[in-house]
Amino acid sequence: MTAPDARRPATARLRLAGIGLLAVGVAAALYVAGRLHQPDYTFSLFGADPIPPKSLLATIALVLAGAQVLVALWIYRKLPLAGAPPRRLPLAHRLIGAGAFALTVPVAIHCLIAYGVQLTSLRVAIHSIAGCFLYGAFAAKVLAVHSRRLPAWVLPVAGGTLAIVLGVLWYTSALWYYNGYQVPHL
């Protein structure tokens, strides 16, 4: 006879493996689509010079991601001196996350159609691969949020991963633009 709790770790591992496979699948599908796509350098959602508005949207998304991390720390009661989180804070966390994600979509569409996935330089390769990874990580985070039987560390790791990847994307794009088309230390 097997105790009911004996199957829980195996079930959690299977769920994590499934979520991980989906994340890899989304990232790989975007990578392959971007590599196979013929770039259309004339396409623009943002007018004649798309880099300034894309940089602005990326910067706002990064600020929102930073807010997401702080709000999550408050929800988990990991911020010193913050006190108990208000009851509506989880809703604010979801709305901020949805806003950050929504800001990345037009930028990603523009990048995928206009440029595809390119590996022409280190900066461009990191940016292209991180862009694919972002949406795989987002799919994983959404599934992890809706799965109630995962270890407690999964959501913070998934959320932190999203924030870090968004930071990498910002560093290899918006900072590159704001810094006179140069990326420090890359």
Image (cartoon, grey):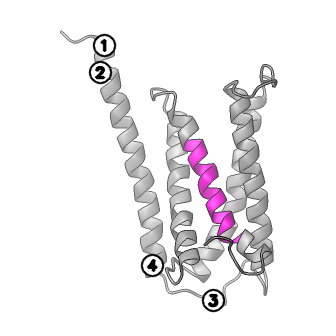
Left or right side of 173 for 82 = right
Range shown magenta:
158-174
Q: Count how many numbered circles sit on residues in the image.
A: 4
Q: Residues within 10 Å of mark 4 (few under 14, many from 20)?
A: some
Q: CA distance from mark 3 to mark 4?
A: 15 Å
Q: Give the structural element (helix, strand or loop) at label 3.
A: loop
Q: CA distance from mark 4 to mark 1?
A: 47 Å
Q: Residues within 10 Å of mark 3 (few under 14, many from 20)?
A: few
Q: Give the structural element (helix, strand or loop) at label 4.
A: helix
Q: Amino acid at mark 2?
A: Arg
Q: Residue at x 75, y 76 (%)?
A: 177
Quadrant of image for the N terminus: top left
* Between discs 3 and 4, the one toward the N terminus: 4
Residue 89 percent location from the top left of the image: 77, 30
Asked if residue 20 is among those painted magenta in the image, a careful observer would answer: no
Return the residue at label 4.
35
* Between discs 4 and 1, the one toward the N terminus: 1
Q: Residue at x 79, y 83 (%)?
A: 47
Prevailing secondary structure of the magenta residues: helix
Return the residue at label 1.
4
